[in-house]
Amino acid sequence: MNEVTLEKMKKMKLYGMHRAFKISLELGKEETYTPDEITAHLIEAEWEDRHNRSIEQKVKNARFRYKSAIEDLHYHTERNVDKNQMMRLIDCSFIKNNESVLITGSTGIGKSYIASAIGHQACSMGFRVAYYSTPKLFAKLKMSKADGTYLKEITKIERQHLLILDDFGIQPLDAPSRAALMEIVEDRYAKGALIITSQLPVHKWHEIIGEQTIADAILDRIIHHAHRLDLKGESLRKKKEETNKTVQ
């Protein structure tokens, strides 16, 4: 009878229940539960399993650059990373409020890692997140214009609760990239959250975007009421490489 029940659970894709019931049988605990306790136990196991699988799928869909976690962040005064500010960001209220987070600083300072850590936290809280390298995104959108999938790509971006644009400003935007950025920012304004990382300080973004009128419109929607992290100090990547060489 129990084997039949287990098989039916598996066919119905009740994997959490299947695992919990199987463990109970193996440990001989099925008789120690009252009917309401075993029901609650199985439902909780199924809920937990589906919740975890949902998070795993969201993380997979996001395509983060780093597998980073909030717990691994370093709060050093010389890096200009304020722990209280980070705690406010990782509660993800900025996503609920459709706000922007602008993370700037020199190469290797940890901008992408922090953005990814916030993104992972957002996934764990049930938000849909998409991470993109900005140059690669614009190249992809140009190709989608050619093959007719542009609207599909833009719609996919629009559906995300949080969009992460990493490495913004590595090169000046051309007309197609500028138009795509304007569309993305316009679609997200007051409807979705945005994280942008850049080696350039925010006051230089205007010249990177180009075309004054469009740049004004884009930055007006991004900068106002944005949370800012201006990271300082030496490259963490360089420090890590030097440490590894010393150890070797």
Image (spheres, rainbow, N blue to C red):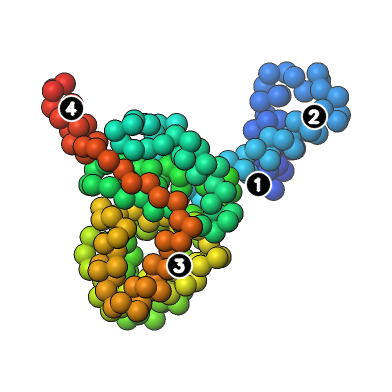
Disc on res. 33: none
Q: CA distance from mark 2 to mark 3?
A: 53 Å
Residue 175 position (above or below residue 115): below
Question: To which residue does mark 3 refer?
Answer: 221
Q: CA distance from mark 2 to mark 4?
A: 52 Å
Question: Secondary structure beneath disc 2?
Answer: helix
Mark 3 or mark 1: which is in front? 3
Residue 105 position (above or below residue 143): above
Question: Secondary structure beneath disc 4?
Answer: helix
Question: To which residue does mark 2 refer?
Answer: 38
Give the percent coordinates (x, y) of residue 208.
Answer: 25, 67
Disc on res. 13: 1
Query: To which quarter of the image does residue 47 belong?
Result: top right
Can residue 10 be seen? no
Disc on res. 244: 4
Can residue 174 be seen? yes
Work out whether residue 202 or residue 115 is closer to the camera in this orientation and state it.
Answer: 202
Mark 3 or mark 4: which is in front? 3
Q: CA distance from mark 3 to mark 1?
A: 44 Å
In which quadrant will I find the C terminus? top left
Residue type of the residue flagged with mark 4: Asn
Mark 2 or mark 3: which is in front? 3
Mark 2 or mark 1: which is in front? 2
Q: Residue at x 21, y 39 (%)?
A: 235
Label 3 or label 1, whichever comes before in sequence order: 1
Mark 2 closeness class: few <14, some 14–19, many ≥20 residues within 10 Å: some
